[in-house]
Image (cartoon, rainbow, N blue to C red):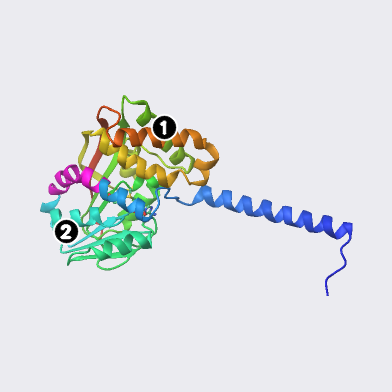
Amino acid sequence: MSRPTTAATEIEAEAEAEAEAEAEAEAEAEAEETTDRYTFGDSPLAADRLALLAATYEPSSARLLRMCASLAPGRAVDLGCGPGHSTRLLHAVVAPAATVGLDSSPDHVARARAAAPPGIDYAVHDVTVTPLPGAPRPDLLYCRFLLTHLRDPGRVLAGWAAAAAPERAALVIEETASMSSAHATFQLYYRLVAELQRHYGQEMMIGRTLDRALAAAGWNAEISGVRELSLPARRMARLHGLNLATWRHDPFARASFAPRMLDELAAGLHAIASGVEDAPDVQHSLRQLVLMRDAAPP
Ligand SMILES: C[S@@+](CC[C@H](N)C(=O)[O-])C[C@H]1O[C@@H](n2cnc3c(N)ncnc32)[C@H](O)[C@@H]1O
C-alpha cells in the first residue's frame, strides 16, 4: 500500500533528493581532485593511436635504450605499458633477463599479452601504487609518456625509488618538454590538450619540470638531455586526430570546448593528415633521462 502524499512530504522528498544530488556532486568533485584520470582512453581506436605513436618514437626511444643495455638488468618493468609496444622495444634493445609490462587498463594489457614474445609478462596494475607486483623487485624501470598523466609525479617517483631492487637501480624516462608548430590547427590542438590536462592536475610539458622531483625522490641523472625531433605534419595530424576522437568525449572537454570548434579542429587535422592541406613539420622536444638510485644502506 502506498503512503498518502501530502504537500509536506513532497517538499521533504524534494529537499532530500536535492541534498543527495549535492552530496554526490561534491564527492565526484573531490574524487576528481585527488585521483588520476587518463583521458586518452583504451578503446581499439586508442590502441591504434598508440601503435602509430610507437612507430613514430621508436627510433629515438631505441637510441636511448641502447645506452642502457650495459646495465644488464635482471628484471625490467615498463610502467604504463599500454598495448605493449614500449615493453617489446625495451625487451629487444636492453635484453633484461625478464621484462614485465604494467598498465591500469585491462584492455591494453590483454592486447599486450596477445602479442607477447617469450620473456615478457604483463599485469594490470595502477603504477602509482607500490610495491609493484611480482618478484624480485625490478632493477630497471622504464616509463614513456606516462608521468604527464599523473597529478603527483613527485610522490610516484619516490614510491618507485622505494619499490626498486635494494641494490643499484635505474629509471629511464621519456616525456615531452615542448611541442610546437607554425600551423594554427596544431597550435589549437596543443592549447586544448594542455588545458584538458591542467584541469586534471597534469602537466603536458612535464619533461621540462621534472628535475627537482627526481632529485627529491633520490634519482640521480646519469644521462639527461632533450632530443629535438622534427616530425612529419601528416603523421602527427593523424595521431592527434585519433586522440581528439577519444578525448572530446571527456566530461571537462564537453563542458568547456564548443562542439563546433572541436568539429573544425577534427576537420583541420583530417585535411593535413590526408595531404589536402600542407603544414610544416611539428617540432617535438623530447626529454630523455637515465637515472640511478644508489643501493639502499644495509
Ligand atoms: C600514452 S600511453 C603510453 C604507452 C606506452 N608507454 C608507450 O609509450 O607506447 C600511457 C599509458 O599509461 C597508462 N596509465 C595511465 N595512468 C596509469 C596508472 N596510474 N597506472 C598504470 N598505467 C597507467 C595508460 O593506460 C596508457 O596505456
Report helix, strand or loop for mark 2. loop
Direction from residue 251 to residue 127 in the image, left or right: left
Q: Amino acid at mark 2?
A: Pro
- Mark 2 Cα-neighbour bin, 10 Å: few <14, some 14–19, many ≥20: many
Residue sitting at x 45%, y 51%: 36
Residue at the left extreme, as displayed: 70
User: Which region of the structure is painted magenta?
Assistant: 53-67
| Residue 151 seen in this snapshot | no
Q: Amino acid at mark 1?
A: Arg
Could you tell me what secondary structure mostly forms the magenta stretch? helix
Residue pointed to by mark 2: 73
Q: Who is closer to the viewer here, 177 or 141? A: 177
**In the rendered view, would you say 90 is above or below 135?**
above
| Residue 244 seen in this snapshot | yes
Q: What x and y, as percent, mark residue 278?
A: 27, 27
Report helix, strand or loop for mark 1. helix
Residue sitting at x 15%, y 64%: 97
Q: CA distance from mark 2 to mark 1?
A: 39 Å
Quarter containing the C terminus:
bottom left
Residue sitting at x 13%, y 53%: 93
Q: Who is closer to the viewer here, 252 or 95? A: 252
Residue pointed to by mark 1: 191
Q: Is residue 60 magenta?
A: yes
Residue at the bottom extreme, as displayed: 1
